[in-house]
Image (cartoon, rainbow, N blue to C red):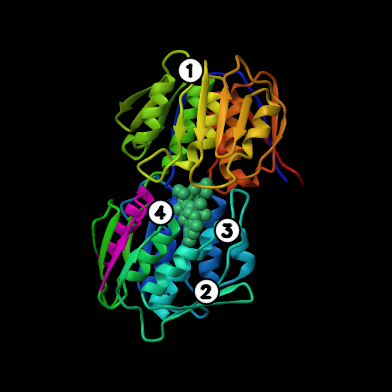
Protein backbone atom coordinates (compact mmCIF):
# COMPACT_ATOMS: atom_id res chain seq x y z
CA UNK A 1 0.00 0.00 0.00
CA UNK A 2 1.31 3.45 -0.90
CA UNK A 3 2.49 5.78 1.79
CA UNK A 4 3.06 9.53 1.83
CA UNK A 5 6.21 11.02 3.36
CA UNK A 6 6.24 14.66 4.45
CA UNK A 7 8.99 16.82 5.90
CA UNK A 8 7.15 19.64 7.64
CA UNK A 9 7.88 23.25 8.44
CA UNK A 10 7.52 24.92 5.03
CA UNK A 11 4.93 27.72 4.77
CA UNK A 12 2.96 26.93 1.59
CA UNK A 13 2.60 29.59 -1.10
CA UNK A 14 1.04 29.28 -4.53
CA UNK A 15 -2.23 28.33 -6.23
CA UNK A 16 -4.30 25.13 -6.20
CA UNK A 17 -7.07 24.38 -8.72
CA UNK A 18 -10.19 23.02 -7.04
CA UNK A 19 -11.83 20.02 -8.74
CA UNK A 20 -15.47 19.12 -9.17
CA UNK A 21 -17.04 17.74 -5.98
CA UNK A 22 -16.80 13.96 -5.51
CA UNK A 23 -19.98 14.04 -3.39
CA UNK A 24 -21.87 15.82 -6.16
CA UNK A 25 -20.44 13.69 -8.97
CA UNK A 26 -21.53 10.40 -7.41
CA UNK A 27 -25.31 11.10 -7.33
CA UNK A 28 -25.04 12.94 -10.67
CA UNK A 29 -23.60 9.81 -12.26
CA UNK A 30 -26.41 7.74 -10.74
CA UNK A 31 -28.92 10.22 -12.23
CA UNK A 32 -27.89 9.01 -15.71
CA UNK A 33 -30.06 5.93 -14.99
CA UNK A 34 -33.17 8.13 -15.09
CA UNK A 35 -33.11 8.58 -18.89
CA UNK A 36 -32.24 6.67 -22.06
CA UNK A 37 -30.56 9.76 -23.46
CA UNK A 38 -27.00 10.89 -22.84
CA UNK A 39 -26.10 12.78 -19.67
CA UNK A 40 -22.79 14.60 -20.11
CA UNK A 41 -20.98 15.52 -16.89
CA UNK A 42 -18.01 17.88 -17.02
CA UNK A 43 -15.51 18.89 -14.31
CA UNK A 44 -15.50 15.41 -12.78
CA UNK A 45 -12.54 14.81 -10.42
CA UNK A 46 -9.96 12.12 -11.14
CA UNK A 47 -10.53 10.21 -7.87
CA UNK A 48 -11.03 6.53 -7.08
CA UNK A 49 -14.67 6.81 -6.00
CA UNK A 50 -15.66 8.21 -9.41
CA UNK A 51 -13.97 5.27 -11.13
CA UNK A 52 -15.79 2.86 -8.79
CA UNK A 53 -19.15 4.43 -9.62
CA UNK A 54 -18.32 4.31 -13.34
CA UNK A 55 -17.50 0.61 -12.99
CA UNK A 56 -20.76 -0.06 -11.15
CA UNK A 57 -22.84 1.78 -13.77
CA UNK A 58 -21.06 -0.05 -16.59
CA UNK A 59 -21.82 -3.36 -14.84
CA UNK A 60 -25.47 -2.35 -14.75
CA UNK A 61 -25.32 -1.67 -18.50
CA UNK A 62 -24.82 2.09 -18.73
CA UNK A 63 -22.72 3.09 -21.73
CA UNK A 64 -19.94 5.42 -20.56
CA UNK A 65 -17.67 7.44 -22.85
CA UNK A 66 -14.87 8.85 -20.71
CA UNK A 67 -12.74 11.92 -21.25
CA UNK A 68 -14.81 13.28 -24.07
CA UNK A 69 -14.46 16.99 -24.70
CA UNK A 70 -16.52 19.40 -22.70
CA UNK A 71 -18.71 21.34 -25.13
CA UNK A 72 -16.92 24.64 -25.65
CA UNK A 73 -13.61 23.19 -24.41
CA UNK A 74 -12.38 24.19 -20.98
CA UNK A 75 -9.50 22.73 -19.07
CA UNK A 76 -11.56 21.59 -16.15
CA UNK A 77 -11.76 17.97 -15.08
CA UNK A 78 -12.88 14.75 -16.62
CA UNK A 79 -15.86 14.53 -18.98
CA UNK A 80 -18.14 11.49 -18.89
CA UNK A 81 -20.97 10.85 -21.36
CA UNK A 82 -23.35 8.37 -19.72
CA UNK A 83 -26.19 6.65 -21.61
CA UNK A 84 -28.52 4.22 -19.87
CA UNK A 85 -30.29 2.95 -22.97
CA UNK A 86 -29.56 -0.72 -22.48
CA UNK A 87 -29.53 -1.40 -18.76
CA UNK A 88 -29.54 -5.15 -18.33
CA UNK A 89 -29.20 -5.84 -14.67
CA UNK A 90 -30.66 -3.42 -12.14
CA UNK A 91 -28.42 -4.51 -9.31
CA UNK A 92 -25.43 -3.30 -7.30
CA UNK A 93 -23.35 -6.23 -6.02
CA UNK A 94 -21.89 -6.55 -2.52
CA UNK A 95 -18.26 -6.32 -3.59
CA UNK A 96 -18.84 -2.89 -5.12
CA UNK A 97 -21.19 -1.53 -2.45
CA UNK A 98 -18.77 -2.76 0.23
CA UNK A 99 -16.04 -0.75 -1.49
CA UNK A 100 -18.11 2.39 -1.82
CA UNK A 101 -21.29 2.97 0.16
CA UNK A 102 -22.43 5.66 -2.27
CA UNK A 103 -23.24 2.78 -4.68
CA UNK A 104 -26.57 2.72 -2.83
CA UNK A 105 -27.45 5.90 -4.76
CA UNK A 106 -28.36 3.79 -7.81
CA UNK A 107 -31.34 2.37 -5.92
CA UNK A 108 -33.74 5.31 -6.29
CA UNK A 109 -33.10 5.83 -10.02
CA UNK A 110 -33.29 2.09 -10.80
CA UNK A 111 -36.60 1.50 -9.05
CA UNK A 112 -38.05 4.72 -10.52
CA UNK A 113 -37.03 3.91 -14.11
CA UNK A 114 -37.19 0.08 -14.21
CA UNK A 115 -39.59 -0.73 -11.38
CA UNK A 116 -37.05 -2.77 -9.46
CA UNK A 117 -33.59 -2.70 -7.94
CA UNK A 118 -31.44 -5.20 -6.09
CA UNK A 119 -28.75 -3.44 -4.09
CA UNK A 120 -26.44 -4.90 -1.51
CA UNK A 121 -26.93 -3.48 1.96
CA UNK A 122 -23.82 -1.35 2.49
CA UNK A 123 -21.91 -2.48 5.55
CA UNK A 124 -20.81 0.07 8.11
CA UNK A 125 -17.53 1.83 7.65
CA UNK A 126 -14.79 3.26 9.82
CA UNK A 127 -16.78 6.34 10.82
CA UNK A 128 -19.99 4.60 11.81
CA UNK A 129 -22.70 2.02 11.17
CA UNK A 130 -24.22 4.28 8.48
CA UNK A 131 -27.55 2.52 7.98
CA UNK A 132 -29.77 3.24 4.98
CA UNK A 133 -33.11 2.85 6.77
CA UNK A 134 -34.14 6.41 5.89
CA UNK A 135 -33.46 5.77 2.19
CA UNK A 136 -35.72 2.69 2.30
CA UNK A 137 -38.48 4.39 4.29
CA UNK A 138 -38.58 7.24 1.76
CA UNK A 139 -38.82 4.85 -1.20
CA UNK A 140 -41.58 2.93 0.59
CA UNK A 141 -43.48 6.20 1.01
CA UNK A 142 -43.22 6.56 -2.76
CA UNK A 143 -44.81 3.15 -3.24
CA UNK A 144 -41.79 0.84 -3.49
CA UNK A 145 -42.05 -2.58 -1.84
CA UNK A 146 -38.85 -3.17 0.09
CA UNK A 147 -37.62 -6.59 1.21
CA UNK A 148 -34.27 -7.51 2.73
CA UNK A 149 -32.82 -10.93 2.02
CA UNK A 150 -29.30 -12.40 2.05
CA UNK A 151 -27.72 -9.02 2.64
CA UNK A 152 -29.52 -7.45 -0.30
CA UNK A 153 -32.25 -4.83 -0.59
CA UNK A 154 -34.96 -5.71 -3.11
CA UNK A 155 -36.97 -2.64 -4.10
CA UNK A 156 -40.00 -3.27 -6.34
CA UNK A 157 -42.58 -0.95 -7.90
CA UNK A 158 -43.89 -2.88 -10.92
CA UNK A 159 -46.58 -0.28 -11.57
CA UNK A 160 -44.16 2.62 -11.06
CA UNK A 161 -43.69 4.91 -8.06
CA UNK A 162 -46.40 7.21 -6.74
CA UNK A 163 -45.74 10.74 -5.49
CA UNK A 164 -46.05 11.05 -1.72
CA UNK A 165 -45.15 13.02 1.39
CA UNK A 166 -41.76 12.11 2.81
CA UNK A 167 -40.69 13.61 6.14
CA UNK A 168 -37.10 12.69 7.01
CA UNK A 169 -36.90 12.13 10.80
CA UNK A 170 -33.27 13.25 10.61
CA UNK A 171 -31.29 14.94 7.87
CA UNK A 172 -29.68 12.50 5.44
CA UNK A 173 -27.71 13.58 2.37
CA UNK A 174 -27.86 10.21 0.59
CA UNK A 175 -31.45 9.59 1.61
CA UNK A 176 -32.49 12.96 0.19
CA UNK A 177 -30.60 12.24 -3.05
CA UNK A 178 -32.14 8.79 -3.51
CA UNK A 179 -35.66 10.07 -2.83
CA UNK A 180 -35.24 13.18 -5.00
CA UNK A 181 -34.07 11.17 -8.01
CA UNK A 182 -36.86 8.60 -7.55
CA UNK A 183 -39.53 11.30 -7.20
CA UNK A 184 -38.71 12.86 -10.58
CA UNK A 185 -40.35 9.88 -12.37
CA UNK A 186 -43.05 9.11 -9.78
CA UNK A 187 -46.68 9.60 -10.78
CA UNK A 188 -47.91 12.79 -9.08
CA UNK A 189 -46.38 15.24 -6.63
CA UNK A 190 -43.82 14.44 -3.92
CA UNK A 191 -42.87 16.64 -0.97
CA UNK A 192 -39.52 15.93 0.73
CA UNK A 193 -39.57 17.62 4.15
CA UNK A 194 -36.51 18.01 6.41
CA UNK A 195 -34.46 17.36 3.27
CA UNK A 196 -30.69 17.85 3.37
CA UNK A 197 -29.55 21.18 1.88
CA UNK A 198 -25.93 20.41 1.04
CA UNK A 199 -24.65 22.21 -2.11
CA UNK A 200 -24.18 18.80 -3.72
CA UNK A 201 -27.94 18.25 -3.48
CA UNK A 202 -28.62 21.67 -4.98
CA UNK A 203 -26.23 20.76 -7.81
CA UNK A 204 -28.06 17.45 -8.36
CA UNK A 205 -31.43 19.23 -8.40
CA UNK A 206 -30.19 21.74 -10.99
CA UNK A 207 -29.00 18.88 -13.18
CA UNK A 208 -32.32 17.02 -12.82
CA UNK A 209 -34.20 20.19 -13.84
CA UNK A 210 -31.92 20.47 -16.88
CA UNK A 211 -32.97 16.87 -17.66
CA UNK A 212 -36.65 17.92 -17.56
CA UNK A 213 -37.53 17.30 -13.92
CA UNK A 214 -39.93 19.69 -12.16
CA UNK A 215 -38.48 20.63 -8.76
CA UNK A 216 -39.29 23.58 -6.50
CA UNK A 217 -37.63 24.68 -3.25
CA UNK A 218 -34.10 23.89 -4.45
CA UNK A 219 -31.64 24.85 -1.71
CA UNK A 220 -34.26 24.68 1.02
CA UNK A 221 -35.25 21.92 3.44
CA UNK A 222 -38.53 21.28 1.59
CA UNK A 223 -38.35 20.00 -1.98
CA UNK A 224 -41.52 19.73 -4.10
CA UNK A 225 -41.25 17.43 -7.12
CA UNK A 226 -43.89 16.97 -9.82
CA UNK A 227 -43.21 13.63 -11.48
CA UNK A 228 -42.83 13.49 -15.28
CA UNK A 229 -43.14 10.60 -17.70
CA UNK A 230 -39.51 10.69 -18.82
CA UNK A 231 -36.35 12.72 -18.45
CA UNK A 232 -34.01 13.65 -21.31
CA UNK A 233 -30.25 14.13 -21.62
CA UNK A 234 -28.35 17.24 -20.48
CA UNK A 235 -24.86 18.68 -20.08
CA UNK A 236 -23.93 19.53 -16.49
CA UNK A 237 -20.79 21.06 -14.96
CA UNK A 238 -20.11 19.58 -11.51
CA UNK A 239 -20.02 22.11 -8.64
CA UNK A 240 -16.55 22.78 -7.11
CA UNK A 241 -15.60 20.59 -4.15
CA UNK A 242 -16.15 22.62 -0.98
CA UNK A 243 -14.38 20.04 1.20
CA UNK A 244 -11.30 20.01 -1.03
CA UNK A 245 -11.45 23.83 -0.84
CA UNK A 246 -11.66 23.73 2.97
CA UNK A 247 -8.84 21.19 3.15
CA UNK A 248 -6.36 23.28 1.16
CA UNK A 249 -7.24 26.54 2.89
CA UNK A 250 -6.43 24.72 6.12
CA UNK A 251 -3.05 23.73 4.61
CA UNK A 252 -2.29 27.45 4.13
CA UNK A 253 -3.35 28.26 7.69
CA UNK A 254 -1.53 25.39 9.42
CA UNK A 255 1.77 26.10 7.63
CA UNK A 256 1.56 29.90 7.99
CA UNK A 257 1.47 30.42 4.24
CA UNK A 258 -0.93 31.81 1.65
CA UNK A 259 -2.65 29.77 -1.09
CA UNK A 260 -5.01 30.87 -3.88
CA UNK A 261 -7.87 28.35 -4.24
CA UNK A 262 -8.60 28.63 -7.98
CA UNK A 263 -12.27 27.85 -8.63
CA UNK A 264 -12.98 27.80 -4.88
CA UNK A 265 -16.32 29.34 -3.90
CA UNK A 266 -16.60 31.13 -0.54
CA UNK A 267 -20.42 30.94 -0.71
CA UNK A 268 -20.24 27.13 -0.37
CA UNK A 269 -18.20 27.24 2.85
CA UNK A 270 -19.61 30.17 4.86
CA UNK A 271 -19.61 28.26 8.17
CA UNK A 272 -15.99 27.21 7.57
CA UNK A 273 -14.96 30.77 6.67
CA UNK A 274 -16.67 32.19 9.79
CA UNK A 275 -14.93 29.74 12.10
CA UNK A 276 -11.53 29.97 10.41
CA UNK A 277 -11.71 33.78 10.53
CA UNK A 278 -12.23 33.58 14.30
CA UNK A 279 -9.24 31.21 14.44
CA UNK A 280 -6.98 33.76 12.71
CA UNK A 281 -7.28 32.94 9.00
CA UNK A 282 -7.76 35.77 6.47
CA UNK A 283 -9.67 35.41 3.18
CA UNK A 284 -9.30 37.63 0.13
CA UNK A 285 -11.49 37.08 -2.97
CA UNK A 286 -9.65 37.09 -6.30
CA UNK A 287 -10.68 36.99 -9.98
CA UNK A 288 -10.62 33.19 -10.05
CA UNK A 289 -11.38 32.22 -6.46
CA UNK A 290 -9.85 33.44 -3.23
CA UNK A 291 -6.61 33.52 -1.24
CA UNK A 292 -6.48 32.05 2.27
CA UNK A 293 -3.64 32.98 4.56
CA UNK A 294 -2.85 32.90 8.25
CA UNK A 295 -3.56 36.47 9.36
CA UNK A 296 -1.83 36.31 12.73
CA UNK A 297 -1.36 33.72 15.48
CA UNK A 298 -3.88 30.91 15.47
CA UNK A 299 -6.50 30.99 18.21
CA UNK A 300 -8.52 28.05 19.59
CA UNK A 301 -12.21 28.08 18.58
CA UNK A 302 -15.15 25.83 19.48
CA UNK A 303 -16.98 23.92 16.76
CA UNK A 304 -20.03 21.69 16.44
CA UNK A 305 -20.55 19.82 13.17
CA UNK A 306 -24.04 20.19 11.70
CA UNK A 307 -25.90 19.55 8.44
CA UNK A 308 -25.47 22.34 5.84
CA UNK A 309 -25.36 25.32 6.24
CA UNK A 310 -23.63 24.39 9.55
CA UNK A 311 -19.97 23.42 9.89
CA UNK A 312 -19.47 20.28 7.74
CA UNK A 313 -18.52 17.01 9.43
CA UNK A 314 -16.17 16.38 6.47
CA UNK A 315 -14.05 19.31 7.70
CA UNK A 316 -13.93 18.26 11.37
CA UNK A 317 -10.65 16.31 11.21
CA UNK A 318 -8.92 19.06 9.25
CA UNK A 319 -10.02 21.69 11.78
CA UNK A 320 -8.77 19.53 14.62
CA UNK A 321 -5.30 19.32 13.06
CA UNK A 322 -5.25 23.13 12.83
CA UNK A 323 -6.47 23.60 16.41
CA UNK A 324 -3.73 21.28 17.70
CA UNK A 325 -1.19 24.12 17.16
CA UNK A 326 -3.48 27.04 18.01
CA UNK A 327 -3.04 29.19 21.12
CA UNK A 328 -5.47 28.17 23.84
CA UNK A 329 -8.05 25.42 23.89
CA UNK A 330 -10.88 24.44 21.56
CA UNK A 331 -13.76 22.00 21.77
CA UNK A 332 -14.91 20.09 18.71
CA UNK A 333 -18.23 18.24 18.89
CA UNK A 334 -19.14 15.70 16.19
CA UNK A 335 -22.93 15.41 15.91
CA UNK A 336 -23.28 13.60 12.56
CA UNK A 337 -21.28 10.36 12.88
CA UNK A 338 -20.75 8.23 15.97
CA UNK A 339 -17.11 7.34 15.40
CA UNK A 340 -15.35 10.14 13.60
CA UNK A 341 -12.44 10.78 15.97
CA UNK A 342 -10.03 8.11 14.72
CA UNK A 343 -7.55 10.78 13.70
CA UNK A 344 -7.21 11.76 17.40
CA UNK A 345 -4.83 9.01 18.58
CA UNK A 346 -2.74 9.53 15.43
CA UNK A 347 -2.54 13.30 15.97
CA UNK A 348 -1.55 12.60 19.59
CA UNK A 349 1.32 10.47 18.33
CA UNK A 350 2.54 13.69 16.68
CA UNK A 351 2.42 15.54 19.99
CA UNK A 352 -1.09 16.97 19.87
CA UNK A 353 -2.88 17.35 23.22
CA UNK A 354 -6.42 16.10 22.62
CA UNK A 355 -8.89 14.46 24.97
CA UNK A 356 -12.10 12.84 23.77
CA UNK A 357 -15.19 12.91 25.96
CA UNK A 358 -18.02 11.13 24.12
CA UNK A 359 -18.94 13.20 21.05
CA UNK A 360 -16.64 16.06 22.02
CA UNK A 361 -12.86 16.47 21.88
CA UNK A 362 -10.93 19.06 23.86
CA UNK A 363 -7.83 20.25 22.04
CA UNK A 364 -5.18 22.20 23.95
CA UNK A 365 -2.83 23.85 21.45
CA UNK A 366 0.88 23.00 21.58
CA UNK A 367 3.71 25.12 20.14
CA UNK A 368 4.86 22.49 17.60
CA UNK A 369 3.93 19.03 16.43
CA UNK A 370 6.62 16.47 15.72
CA UNK A 371 6.64 14.17 12.72
CA UNK A 372 5.89 10.47 13.22
CA UNK A 373 4.68 7.40 11.31
CA UNK A 374 0.85 7.48 11.46
CA UNK A 375 -2.05 5.42 10.14
CA UNK A 376 -4.85 6.68 7.91
CA UNK A 377 -8.27 5.25 8.76
CA UNK A 378 -10.73 7.11 6.53
CA UNK A 379 -10.70 9.78 3.85
CA UNK A 380 -10.83 12.91 5.98
CA UNK A 381 -8.84 11.53 8.93
CA UNK A 382 -5.97 10.73 6.54
CA UNK A 383 -5.95 14.24 5.13
CA UNK A 384 -5.84 15.71 8.65
CA UNK A 385 -2.67 13.69 9.32
CA UNK A 386 -1.05 15.09 6.19
CA UNK A 387 -2.00 18.62 7.27
CA UNK A 388 -0.42 17.99 10.66
CA UNK A 389 2.67 16.59 8.93
CA UNK A 390 3.00 19.75 6.84
CA UNK A 391 3.29 21.79 10.04
CA UNK A 392 5.25 19.29 12.14
CA UNK A 393 8.97 19.34 12.78
CA UNK A 394 10.69 16.44 11.06
CA UNK A 395 9.32 13.58 9.01
CA UNK A 396 5.80 12.16 8.96
CA UNK A 397 4.85 9.03 7.06
CA UNK A 398 1.12 8.47 6.52
CA UNK A 399 0.29 4.82 5.81
CA UNK A 400 -2.72 3.46 3.84
CA UNK A 401 -3.11 6.51 1.62
CA UNK A 402 -5.60 4.65 -0.57
CA UNK A 403 -8.11 6.37 1.70
CA UNK A 404 -6.84 9.72 0.40
CA UNK A 405 -7.02 8.66 -3.23
CA UNK A 406 -10.76 8.14 -2.90
CA UNK A 407 -11.43 11.85 -2.61
CA UNK A 408 -8.39 13.99 -3.44
CA UNK A 409 -7.03 14.35 -6.97
CA UNK A 410 -3.24 14.66 -7.46
CA UNK A 411 -2.97 15.43 -3.75
CA UNK A 412 0.79 15.43 -3.27
CA UNK A 413 1.36 17.24 -6.60
CA UNK A 414 -0.93 20.09 -5.62
CA UNK A 415 0.83 20.51 -2.28
CA UNK A 416 4.39 20.15 -3.56
CA UNK A 417 3.61 22.81 -6.20
CA UNK A 418 3.07 25.15 -3.24
CA UNK A 419 6.40 24.28 -1.65
CA UNK A 420 5.53 21.27 0.49
CA UNK A 421 8.25 18.64 0.91
CA UNK A 422 5.92 15.71 0.20
CA UNK A 423 6.31 12.52 -1.81
CA UNK A 424 4.41 9.28 -2.40
CA UNK A 425 6.27 6.06 -1.61
CA UNK A 426 4.80 3.44 -3.91
CA UNK A 427 4.67 -0.14 -2.66
CA UNK A 428 5.48 -2.39 -5.60
C1 LIG B 1 -22.76 11.96 2.75
O1 LIG B 1 -22.80 10.67 3.35
C2 LIG B 1 -21.33 12.16 2.30
N1 LIG B 1 -20.97 11.14 1.30
C3 LIG B 1 -20.37 12.07 3.50
O2 LIG B 1 -19.04 12.37 3.03
C4 LIG B 1 -20.78 13.15 4.50
O3 LIG B 1 -19.96 13.04 5.65
C5 LIG B 1 -22.25 12.95 4.89
O4 LIG B 1 -23.08 12.98 3.70
C6 LIG B 1 -22.74 14.05 5.82
O5 LIG B 1 -22.58 15.29 5.22
C7 LIG B 1 -21.37 11.31 0.02
O6 LIG B 1 -22.03 12.28 -0.32
C8 LIG B 1 -20.96 10.25 -0.95
P1 LIG B 1 -26.02 11.02 5.71
P2 LIG B 1 -24.25 10.02 3.72
O7 LIG B 1 -27.01 10.10 5.11
O8 LIG B 1 -25.24 10.39 2.68
C9 LIG B 1 -27.38 8.59 9.58
C10 LIG B 1 -16.76 12.02 2.75
O9 LIG B 1 -15.82 12.06 3.55
N2 LIG B 1 -28.27 7.90 8.65
O10 LIG B 1 -26.29 12.49 5.68
O11 LIG B 1 -24.04 8.59 4.00
C11 LIG B 1 -25.91 8.28 9.30
O12 LIG B 1 -25.52 7.10 9.97
C12 LIG B 1 -18.05 11.34 3.14
O13 LIG B 1 -16.74 12.54 1.60
C13 LIG B 1 -29.20 7.01 9.16
O14 LIG B 1 -29.28 6.79 10.36
O15 LIG B 1 -24.58 10.78 5.07
C14 LIG B 1 -25.21 9.49 9.83
O16 LIG B 1 -25.05 9.35 11.23
C15 LIG B 1 -17.97 10.72 4.53
N3 LIG B 1 -30.04 6.36 8.31
C16 LIG B 1 -26.20 10.62 9.56
O17 LIG B 1 -27.48 10.00 9.37
C17 LIG B 1 -29.98 6.58 6.95
O18 LIG B 1 -30.79 5.96 6.21
C18 LIG B 1 -25.88 11.43 8.31
O19 LIG B 1 -25.76 10.54 7.23
C19 LIG B 1 -29.03 7.48 6.44
C20 LIG B 1 -28.19 8.14 7.30
Q: Earlier in the sequence, mark 3 or mark 1?
A: 3
Cα separation, mark 2 vs mark 1, equals: 50 Å
Of pointers 4 and 1, the one earlier in the residue sequence = 4
Earlier sequence position, callout 2 versus callout 1 = 2
How many other residues sit within 10 Å of disc 4, few (<14), some (14-19) or many (≥20)? many
Which of the two discs, 3 and 2, sits closer to the camera?
A: 3
Picture coordinates of residue 191, whole percent (x, y): 28, 65
* Ligand 1 within 8 Å, label 2 CB: no
Q: State the image quarter where residue 279 is shown.
A: top left
- The Cα atoms of the two marked residues, 3 and 2, are separated by 16 Å
Which mark sits nearer the N-terminus, 3 or 2? 2
As drawn, 13 above or below 53: above
Q: Earlier in the sequence, mark 4 or mark 3?
A: 3
Which residue is under mark 1? 298
Mark 4 and mark 1: span between their CA atoms? Answer: 33 Å
Q: Which residue is mark 4?
A: 171
Amino acid sequence: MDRIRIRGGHPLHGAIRICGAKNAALPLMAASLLTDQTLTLTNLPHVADISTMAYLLAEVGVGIHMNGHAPGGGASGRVFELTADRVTDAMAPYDLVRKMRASVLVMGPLVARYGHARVSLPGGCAIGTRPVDLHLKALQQLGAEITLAEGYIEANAPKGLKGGNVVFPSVTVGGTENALMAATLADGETVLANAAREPEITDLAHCLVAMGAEIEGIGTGTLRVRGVKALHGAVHHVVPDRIETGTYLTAAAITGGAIELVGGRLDLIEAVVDLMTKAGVAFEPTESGFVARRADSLRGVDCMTEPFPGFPTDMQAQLMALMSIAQGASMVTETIFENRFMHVPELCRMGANINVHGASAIIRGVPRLSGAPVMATDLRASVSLVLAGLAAEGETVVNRVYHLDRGYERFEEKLSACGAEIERIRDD
